[in-house]
Structures are given as structure tokens and as C-alpha cells.
Amino acid sequence: MVDKDRIKGSAEQAKGKVKEWVGKATGDKKTETKGKADQVGGKVRNAVGGLKDAVRGK
């Protein structure tokens, strides 16, 4: 079983990528920056989930 943090982290990364793309397409720097931040947050959450899996021996 994969840790829920990994799933949520991947979803957050995807959402951030979409926000970044929309921000670039519309010229909205604020949305683009939020998208990049969401991606970083998703990567961190995914890494935490990976560590949890490693501790469980998966």
C-alpha cells in the first residue's frame, strides 16, 4: 500500500503544473508563482510519503 501523502503530493504537483501553465498562458505572474509553489509543496509531500514507506519497509 502506498502512503496517502505520496498520492496527495502527486496530485498537488499536477495541480501546480496546471496553475503554472495557466499563469504563463494568461500572463498572470501571481497564478504562475502559486503553481510553482504548489509543485514544490507536492514534491515535499511526496518525499514525506516516500520516507514513511521506507520506514514501513515497503
Image: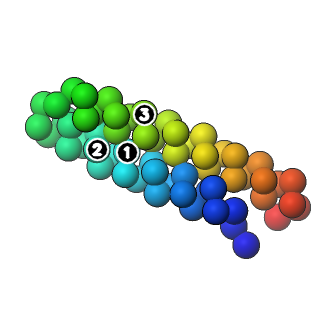
Q: Please state which amino acid type lies under the numbered disc 2.
A: Lys
Element type at marker 3?
Answer: helix
Whether pointer 1 and pointer 2 mark residues with C-beta atoms closer than 8 Å, the reply is yes
**Residue occupying the point 66% across, 45% down:** 47
Residue type at mark 1 is Gly
Instruction: Tell me the crowding category of disc 1: few under 14, some 14 to 19, or many 20 or more residues within 10 angstroms, Cα based.
Output: many
**Mark before the other along the chain sequence, 3 or 1:** 1
Which label belongs to residue 16? 1
In the picture provided, is 57 more to the left or to the right than 45?
A: right
Whether label 3 touches label 1, CB < 8 Å: yes
What is the spatial separation of the Cα atoms under label 1 and label 2, in whole angstroms?
A: 5 Å
Q: CA distance from mark 3 to mark 1?
A: 7 Å
Number of residue marks: 3
Relative image position of residue 52 (x, y in whole percent): 78, 53
Give the mark nearer the N terminus: 2 vs 3.
2
From the viewer's perspective, tell me whether residue 5 is left or right of residue 17. right
Q: What is the x, y in percent for residue 57?
A: 88, 61
Q: Residue visible at 69% across and 62% down?
A: 3
> Residue 37: which numbered mark, if any?
3
| The furthest residue to the top | 29
- In terms of secondary structure, where does tag 2 sit? helix
Residue denoted by label 2 = 19
Residue 11 is situated, as x and y percent measured from the top left of the image, at 46, 57
Reply above or below: 41 against 3.
Answer: above
Instruction: From the viewer's perspective, tell me whether residue 33 is left or right of residue 14.
Output: left
Q: Is residue 5 above or below residue 31?
A: below
Task: Check disc 3 and give the amino acid type.
Answer: Ala
Position of the N terminus, as image quadrant, is bottom right
Residue that protrudes farthest toward the bottom in the picture: 1
In space, the residues marked 2 and 3 are separated at their CA atoms by: 10 Å
Q: Quadrant of the C terminus?
A: bottom right
Badge 2, how many Cα within 10 Å: few under 14, some, many 20+? many
